[in-house]
Image: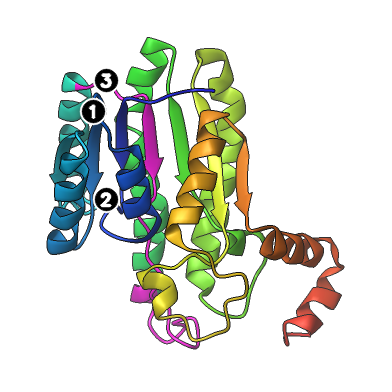
Amino acid sequence: MKSFSSIVITGASSGIGEAMALDYAAPGVALALTGRDADRLETVTAACRAKGATIVAATIDVTDRERFLPWLEAFDDAHPVDLVIANAGISIDKDNSSLDDFSIIRKTLDVNINGVLNTVEPLLPRMIARKRGQIGIVSSLAGFIGLPYSASYNASKAAVRVWGESIRYVLKKDGVGVSVICPGFVVSRITAEAPFPMPFLMTSAKASAIIRRGLALNRPRIAFPIGTKAAVWLGTTLPGRWSARLLGAG
């Protein structure tokens, strides 16, 4: 199993990102943390420092490539990164999937897709040069099937899932692992505002434990919980017209 000592986590001010930061924090570990909420990020930062970790934190928008790139490179200069977790994401669609306001759709795709690219791009050439490292790309089980809600969120998670699974093959020869992380419903600010039932809702602490084990084992896909995973698998195996009927679009 791999162990990590220099870790980048985006979206670290709440949810899965916060739980993973707290779990990885330990003496001898350096963490680079970003988040949108400065107060919450400071709380997470203080808790991680109390556990003995070295922390570099900033409220940088992952879509701000010009600011984000040099910040990541500076952290890597001081603490060569061996794990990057591209976790930052938003789900802001309205009930009609924002078809009356495409600016919301574009913003979702920008954060959830370009934010992942902006997180990975500055660090990838350095990992390749060192012939080591692990990349964790946070997708979602919602990225496997066209669900009735949050169309742009679902689409963005499908895009980063397929991208991550594809580049895994390319990077294997360079000693860099890629794991695509596909959670179901996890307690977070996103799920707190969801207008629909959330079966098998899981705590962020439990999700973090599953993800950390999967990353240490360099698993290609870390998908959970089993109940939601099974339901999604069934939905993807059905003929399109059947799944559309089940979802009310037939």
Q: How far separated are the C-alphas under marks 2 and 1?
A: 27 Å
Residue type at the position of mark 3: Pro
Q: Which residue is mark 2?
A: 62
Q: How far separated are the C-alphas under marks 3 and 2?
A: 20 Å
Q: In terms of sequence position, does the residue under pointer 3 or pointer 2 come before the other?
A: 2
Q: How far separated are the C-alphas under marks 3 and 1?
A: 16 Å
Q: Which mark is residue 80?
A: 3
Q: Position of residue 151 (x, y in %)?
A: 53, 73
Residue type at the position of mark 2: Val
Q: Is 101 covered by the magenta stretch?
A: yes
Residue at the location (34% across, 66% down)? 107
Image vertical order of residue 169 relative to residue 223, above or below = above
Question: Nearer the observer, disc 3 or disc 2?
Answer: 3
Q: Secondary structure at mark 3?
A: loop
Compare residues 211 and 240 and report the one nearer the observer. Answer: 211
Residue at the location (46% across, 49% down)? 208
Does 18 sit left or right of 200 as displayed? left
Q: In terms of sequence position, does the residue under pointer 2 or pointer 1 come before the other?
A: 1
- Specify the farthest residue to the front: 51
Q: Quadrant of the N terminus?
A: top right
Q: Which residue is mark 1?
A: 27
